[in-house]
Image (spheres, helix red, strand yellow):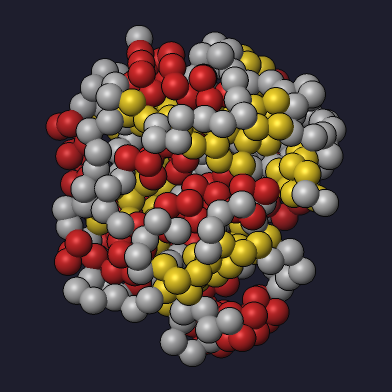
């Protein structure tokens, strides 16, 4: 099926956005990509322009820019603009625009944890047992009455920090107070979910949908802690690999997840009146006895999952996204996925996820371009020099015939990156190789 030539506006500045523009720039359907604000990596791509003088939050200014540049395809990268309603705003204000991303109503699946838990209950989607509370005293009484381990989640967006896994009852009460009374996460703590603690291996699945049919990418595993062996504080993600081995998630389990979790989620959203268009990120816990359970939904591509799964996608990404926005995804199914593996090792600034320096000069040696790609996250080009500008600075992604080869190449890629204070995990994908 013929598709329009796309002039793309991509919102965001992370490694995910570098990977998306890198993949989209390879498509014959893509004329040009504007990234607001982009990073040092997107700045260096052909047919990609960074726009640094418009704020990601200024929807009217973004819409005027889109009209001026004849943008016909919007891709919001991060959750914040989606939850704030950028999709609805563009559809109402930019004639002819197609948006790869859910409406404000559909983005509640990520924007509100109590909302997504109630959705899962309504549609019988397996998830941890839970109760929602907006009243502190009621939440406290519930904590006192139960005797299993819990996880406490602030309802709203809290930049990945609103989930607390207390080790003792005292810690659980302290967390509840921090969220609901001290309001550590502001309005995100107006209500909380208290849910059953689940054991198992985690994995993330990215699923394209046009609101009706689905196409999932290979499952990936993230590494959230800063230190080797999953130690130390949580981060935005220090590395990923894909696909997960059979030990974590087998082919038949994956089929079962598509049938009993992912398709019912898309169908349930449509039936409830908030049809999902875009990429649905489902965080799963593979429990040893009770199968896959949903930990969370995100309404966008994962970072750094995207960096590992996009190199495995053989179908043209622009075509895939376009058909999601025209309710014609079935015309490009099944999507073509390479039989290779991929791994991504994130290199962070010293001190991250605590305080860290910015403006540190970075030098990059050449890498084996057929197998390895350097995806920038917290970088900028200033006066012709590449500098750090964030905590997660840059990553090396590599593909290989198997996971061991991909990991080896990714670490060779890391050797091409140099800046003062750089830190990275040395055990990315070790769980997958076990
Ligand atoms: P979420 O943002 O809901 O995915 O939570 C962030 C992280 O907290 C997840 O990636 C898990 O590592 C952990 N987590 C969340 N919910 C649970 C649960 N019910 N049991 C165990 N760990 C959890
Ligand atoms: N890698 C987890 C996320 O994107 O939220």
Q: Residue at image x 38%, y 76%?
A: 5
Q: Is residue 55 left or right of residue 202?
A: right
Q: Is residue 63 above or below residue 184?
A: below
Q: Is residue 168 above or below residue 391?
A: above
Q: Quadrant of residue 145?
A: top right
Q: Residue at image x 52%, y 30%?
A: 367
Q: Is residue 51 left or right of residue 86?
A: right
- In this rendered view, identify the residue nearer to me: 305 or 256: 305
Tell me where residue 35 appears, x and y as whole percent.
60, 63
- In this rendered view, identify the residue nearer to me: 200 or 400: 400
Q: Quadrant of residue 356?
A: top right
Tell me where residue 294 appears, x and y as whole percent.
38, 39
Q: Quadrant of residue 409?
A: top left
Q: Residue at image x 30%, y 61%?
A: 320
Q: Which quadrant holds the C terminus?
A: top left
Q: Residue at image x 82%, y 34%?
A: 360
- In this rendered view, identify the residue nearer to me: 426 or 124: 426
Tell me where residue 240 appears, x and y as whole percent.
46, 30
Tell me how many marks there are.
0
For residue 103, say whether it is visible: no
Q: Which quadrant holds the N terminus?
A: bottom left
- In this rendered view, identify the residue nearer to me: 381 or 135: 381
Tell me where residue 38 appears, x and y as whole percent.
64, 56
For residue 32, say whether it is visible: yes
């Amino acid at each position: 099926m013929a598709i329009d030539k796309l002039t793309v506006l991509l919102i965001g500045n992370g490694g995910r956005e570098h990977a998306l523009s890198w993949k989209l720039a390879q498509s014959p359907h893509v004329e040009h990509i504007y990234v607001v604000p982009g990073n040092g990596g997107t700045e260096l791509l052909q047919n990609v322009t960074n726009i640094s003088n418009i704020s990601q939050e200024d929807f009217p200014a973004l819409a005027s820019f889109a009209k001026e540049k004849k943008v016909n395809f919007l891709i919001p990268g991060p959750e914040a603009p989606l939850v704030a309603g950028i999709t609805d705003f563009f559809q109402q204000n930019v004639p002819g625009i197609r948006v790869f991303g859910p409406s404000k109503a559909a983005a509640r699946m990520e924007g509100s944890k109590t909302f997504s838990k109630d959705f899962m209950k309504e549609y019988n989607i397996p998830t941890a047992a839970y109760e929602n509370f907006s009243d502190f005293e009621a939440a406290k009484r519930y904590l006192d009455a139960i005797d299993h381990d819990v996880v406490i989640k602030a309802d709203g967006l809290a930049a990945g920090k609103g989930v607390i896994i207390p080790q003792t009852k005292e810690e659980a009460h302290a967390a509840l107070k921090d969220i609901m009374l001290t309001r550590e996460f502001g309005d995100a703590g107006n209500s909380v979910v208290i849910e059953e603690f689940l054991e198992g291996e985690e994995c993330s699945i990215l699923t394209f949908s046009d609101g009706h049919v689905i196409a999932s990418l290979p499952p990936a595993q993230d590494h959230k802690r800063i230190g080797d062996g999953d130690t130390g504080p949580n981060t935005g993600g220090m590395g990923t690999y894909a696909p997960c081995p059979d030990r974590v998630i087998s082919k038949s389990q994956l089929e079962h997840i598509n049938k009993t979790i992912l398709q019912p989620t898309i169908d349930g959203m449509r039936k409830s009146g908030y049809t999902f268009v875009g990429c649905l990120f489902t965080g799963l816990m593979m429990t040893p006895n009770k199968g896959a359970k949903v930990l969370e939904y995100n309404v966008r591509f994962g970072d750094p999952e995207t960096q590992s799964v996009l190199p495995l996608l053989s179908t043209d990404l622009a075509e895939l996204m376009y058909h999601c926005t025209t309710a014609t995804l079935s015309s490009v199914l099944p999507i073509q996925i390479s039989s290779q593996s991929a791994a991504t090792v994130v290199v962070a600034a010293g001190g991250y996820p605590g305080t860290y320096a910015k403006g540190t000069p970075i030098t990059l040696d050449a890498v084996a371009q057929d197998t390895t790609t350097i995806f920038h996250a917290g970088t900028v080009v200033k006066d012709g020099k590449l500098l750090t500008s964030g905590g997660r600075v840059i990553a090396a992604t590599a593909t290989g015939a198997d996971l061991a080869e991909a990991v080896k190449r990714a670490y060779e890629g890391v050797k091409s990156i140099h800046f003062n204070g750089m830190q990275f995990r040395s055990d990315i994908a070790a769980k997958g190789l076990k």
